[in-house]
Structure formats: structure tokens, C-alpha cells
Amino acid sequence: MVPKKKNYISPILSFDFYLENYHKLLKKLKVENDLKQLGSLLKRNIDPSIQEVLETADYEALVVTDSNREIVWADNGFREMTGYAKDFAIGKRPTFLHGTNTSEATRGEIRQLLKEEKRFKAAITNYRKNGEEYQCQIDVLPLYDSENRLTHFLAMEREKKAA
């Protein structure tokens, strides 16, 4: 009598499937946590259109500034991207991340776009705490109160990798 040969599912295929879903779950949990913290910070419900943007956007860090452009909150991704603790950044303007190769023209364009109080995307050269230069892709959304007055800016940031 010849023993039957058993067929096994490859653990590699199972792991690949698991890993793909694991990353989706992590992103979902990160967004849910960010939305909860934003709601707490702003002391109001987050507009559904902003929720949708956060759920579909590809960002590594979130930064919220007040209307004077001083940082009032950053998520955990901020430290991972910049090396700076969130507490260090609070009260500073995002310009503290700029350095010698940060384009003055780009800085001026961003200042103008902020004055227009409309959503915009831009890329700027920033510097990490260790002095390393990186290209930061930002997607900025103005946030308004119930009387349609500007209260904050929300910046979704990610490092722009070289191709």
C-alpha cells in the first residue's frame, strides 16, 4: 500500500495575501486614528469631504497649522518622516524644516497659495533633524468653521522619492 501524498498550501502565498490585507488594515486604522485626533483638536466633527480625502490620499504625515501657520498638531508619521518630535514642532511654523536648498520661489508660491485659502499641492525641499535633505510632497486643505471662517490648514505630506 502506497501512502497518499498530501497537498499543502504554500505558506509564501498565504503570507503574501496576509501581508497585502495587513497593510490595508494598518492604513485604515491610521486614518481612523487621525480623524479621531483631528476631531478632538478642532472640537467639531470632521466634514465628510475631508474624511473622504484622508481615506483616499496617500500620505505619510499629517500636520495641522492654525490660520497664522503655526503648527498645532502633527501625527506620528511626522516624527518618522522628519526625525523631530511632535512636541518640538508645536508652536513653530513648518518653515523650520527649510534649509539652504529650499527654493525661495517655491516658498513664495506656497505663501501665495495659502493666502488664496484653496486646496493645493506642491513639492518643497525640507531637511530632517539629522540634516538630510528630502523632497516633501504636500497636499494642503484649508479647514473652515461653521460660519465658513478659515481656522486651520491641514497638510498631508509624503516624501517624494526619486525615480
Image (cartoon, rainbow, N blue to C red):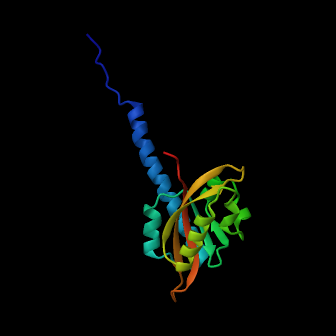
Relative to 3, residue 44 above or below? below
Question: Residue at image x 51%, y 72%?
Answer: 141
Give the total number of marks visible in the rendering: 0
Relative to 79, residue 69 above or below? below
Q: Quadrant of the N terminus?
A: top left
Q: Position of residue 36 (x, y in %)?
A: 55, 69
Residue 155 versus residue 122: which sits nearer the camera?
122
Residue at the extreme top of the image, as rendered: 1
| Residue 88 shown left or right of residue 112 in the figure | right
Relative to 36, residue 42 above or below? below
Residue at the extreme left of the image, as rendered: 1
Q: Position of residue 151 (x, y in %)?
A: 58, 81
> Which corner quadrant of the image does residue 158 belong to?
bottom right
Residue at the extreme front of the image, as rendered: 105
| Residue 14 shown left or right of residue 3 in the figure | right
| Residue 160 shown left or right of residue 81 in the figure | left
Question: Residue at image x 44%, y 67%?
Answer: 53
Q: Position of residue 127 (x, y in %)?
A: 67, 55
Question: Residue at image x 72%, y 71%?
Answer: 91
> Which corner quadrant of the image does residue 90 belong to?
bottom right
Relative to 16, residue 35 above or below? below
